[in-house]
Every structure is written in structure tokens, then in C-alpha cells.
Amino acid sequence: MAVTDHVDLNGFMEGVKKRNPHQPEFVQAVQEVAEDIFEFIQDKEEYHAQQILRRIAEPDRVVSFRVCWEDDNGNIRVQRGWRVQNNNAIGPYKGGIRFHPSVNESVLKFLAFEQTFKNALTGLPMGGGKGGANFNPKGKSVREIMRFCQSFMTELYRHIGADVDVPAGDIGVGAREIGFMFGQYKRITNHFTGVLTGKGLEWGGSLIRTEATGYGAVYFLENMLATKGEGVAGKTAVISGSGNVATHAAEKIVQLGGKVLTLSDSGGFIHDPDGIDQEKIDWVKTHKTHRRGRIEEYVEAFPRATFHPGKTPWGVPCDVALPCATQNELLGEDAKTLIANGCKAVSEGANMPTDLDGVHVFKHHKILYAPGKASNAGGVAVSGLEMSQNSERRSWKEEELQQMLKDIMKGIHDSCIRYGDQGDGYIDYVKGANIAGFKKVADAMLAFGVV
């Protein structure tokens, strides 16, 4: 085997930046992983010689396409759609579809890159991908959303398949949008296959898929706290977001005896000192999902709460924090504030919600900190289980799936400890997750040769 000159971390990242100009989210995601991987592969010549990290950081393909649709007033609208297929070394590409004005190639490349390691951590045979469009479903009629989804799938269908690439939902894409896209896929191909996950229970979906990401983030938090002989019971929690992940994380915190103090949306956050119990969580679910309302209206229903416009909840004193909204919502100064106010543990429900400064603050102070690729893997884990059920033409019971989800999150936690235990009572979960995910994908790539 040829011996190569090893590029250092700075040299590697300079190359990434040069090849991906104006893509800050993607560069950030690669740097966060590379900081740990370079130390791990320092004495492993095969990874260097085969340029494994360089290859993982270059998507297999990025498909970009035009999406034309007609609004209710007869106007022709044009959006841009993408599917990023990052790596399929251990299974078909797997990852969500996001509809949001902020969607661009950089965001989707970062998500697909992260998804590659996240999916590897689950132990299920899934590669990493992500897709979406710069379409904003807010304010659109159901028929407009249907027409957009149909137009989007009219192009996407040729790039996906049950053994090729299996998309799911994400921000702006729930069961309704998955239904419209699956209907169009079936209409075009005449195939009824498990090509999408997050489907309705009546047509191939899985129980607990809706709850899985939020529940999984709390199960991971529970595993972290257990290393210190503690549990969720009696802990106060601040949570960002008010969508599917945030509300189900809140629900599981309450079920385990914790007290949820905050939820948020793009307009600001609400702080309820009495605690957001199950009745209030149900109100938020109905208000946000069915009425498409704003979180600020929570204070009208529950007057003891306060609304803080334009702010994030990280200044509220708490024992644990769960960022469940979007990327880069928790900054370095926020991380310092959380620690100063006594926060003991952070479990990410969103994808890369903490910026690099914040990650470094958490690691420096050696608190229990779980990166999203580990702690929010519950959603894609149950999506993988949905794929298995589709292949077998069967459905598992809720109790079976709940146990499988707990076992998968425990397995991810154990993998993080295996590679992240620093030997001084501190577990670097970021390092553990990055190395465990990388090693599985990298070893598969070595087996295939240069492809």
C-alpha cells in the first residue's frame, strides 16, 4: 500500500472550504466531525491512503431540479428542489425532505453528511441522504401544498426507490405531505413499495414514528444521567421548538417525572413557571399542528406564563436543556449562560442546533452533552424499522417498537461511551458519536475499494 503524506486538520478544512464556497453550514458540519476523526485516524494509515474522510465529505451526488406549480389564483410559481445522496456504504440513502424558505444546497449537504453518521449509529443498514425545497408551506392552502408535493415528486421519483433512496419527513413535511408525495409516486410508477417513511398507519406507516425523535432524545438524556446515578425525575427542563420533536420530548420528560418550563417558535419563547404538563402539551400540539397558530398565544390560554418575543429560552435556569428547533439556535454565549445557571445536561433534538463555539463550551466544561447525530437518531431508527415492516408486509405492536427504540438509543449511548470515555469520569459524547459512526461507514468503504 502506498504511504501518503498526511494532511493536517487545518489543511483538510482549507480544502473543504475551497471546494464548497458559500456553504457555511456544510463546512461547519464537516469541521465538527473532522476535529475528532483526525485524532482517531492519526496512526491508521489505511484510512489516510484511501482518503476516506475526504470521500465521505464529498456527496455521491447532488441532484438539483426546478419545481413548477400553480397557486390558487392561477399564478405559476417556481421553486428549487434538491436531493443530496451523501453515502450509501452501509445501505440505501435515508434521510428527510425539508420544505422551508431557508433550504439551500449548503443546508441539505450538512444534513446529509450528519445523517450518514447518525444512521450508522443506529446499527441499521441505512446510508445518509437529505432533500427538500425552498418552498414555504405556511400560509398555503391544502390544495396548493398538494400541487407542490405532486410536482416535487414528479422529478424526485426517478432518483429514489426502496433499495436506492428512502426519503422521510422533516421540517415542513409531515404525514400530509408524505401522503401527497407517495400518492404521486404510486401514480407515476404503479408501484406500492416502501419508498417513503413517515406514512399513515393505514398505508404502511409505523406506530410511534411521530413520537420517536423526541422520545429518543429523552431516552438518550436518561442514559447520560444514569452514568451519574441520576434520572429525569425532579429535573427542570428548557426546550426550544414547539413542533413534533419538541412536544414529544416535553411529553416524555413529563412522563418520567420532570418539569418542562419552555417551548418556542420563530417568534420567541414562552416560559411557564408552573410547568408545561400533558394537558398544556396537548393544547400546543393542537394549536400548532391543526390551527397553525403561534406559540405566543399560549399565554392567552395559560395566563401565568410569559412570552418573550424574538428570544431563545437558554437564559431560563434549568437542570437539563433540549434544543429541538433548528440548526445554530444555541450559540457560544447561550452555552455559557446555561452552564452558569446550573444546567447539567444537554440532549439535542434538532440537527446541529449548537454552533461550534457552543460545542466547545460544553466540552470544555465537561457537562453531559449529546450531539444530535446521537441523541435525535430515534426518528430515523423508527423509520428504518418502518422500512423493515414494509419489506415484510407486516406491522409490529407499539410495545415492541417502544422497546426497540429504547434498545437502539441505549446501543448508541454505549457506542459513544466506547469511543468517547476520557478515563477521568468524563464522556465526550461528541467524540464518541463521531468516531463510532465514522468507523462503521469507513470500514465498509474500505471493503468496496475505490468507488
Image (cartoon, rainbow, N blue to C red):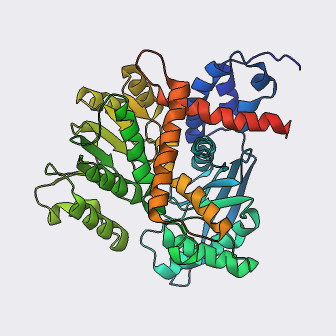
Q: Is residue 288 left or right of residue 104?
A: left
Residue nearest the observer in this picture, 235 or 69: 235
Image location of residue 29, percent across then percent down = 57, 37
Q: Is residue 302 left or right of residue 143?
A: left
Q: Is residue 271 left or right of residue 320?
A: left
Residue farthest toward the right in the current orientation of the protein: 1
Q: Residue at x 14, y 62 (%)?
A: 302
Image location of residue 38, percent across then percent down = 64, 22
Report the number of discs: 0
Q: Is residue 394 left or right of residue 86?
A: left
Q: Quadrant of the C terminus?
A: top right
Residue nearest the observer in this picture, 178 or 148: 178
Q: Residue at x 68, y 25 (%)?
A: 12
The answer to whether residue 387 is above or below residue 110 is below
Residue farthest toward the left in the current orientation of the protein: 304
Image location of residue 300, percent across then percent down = 15, 65
Q: Is residue 261 visible?
A: yes
Q: Quadrant of the N terminus?
A: top right
* Quarter assignment of residue 361: top left
Image location of residue 301, percent across then percent down = 16, 66
Q: Is residue 352 visible?
A: no
Q: Residue at x 67, y 32 (%)?
A: 439
Residue nearest the observer in this picture, 147 or 38: 38
* Quarter assignment of residue 36: top right
Residue nearest the observer in this picture, 248 or 331: 248
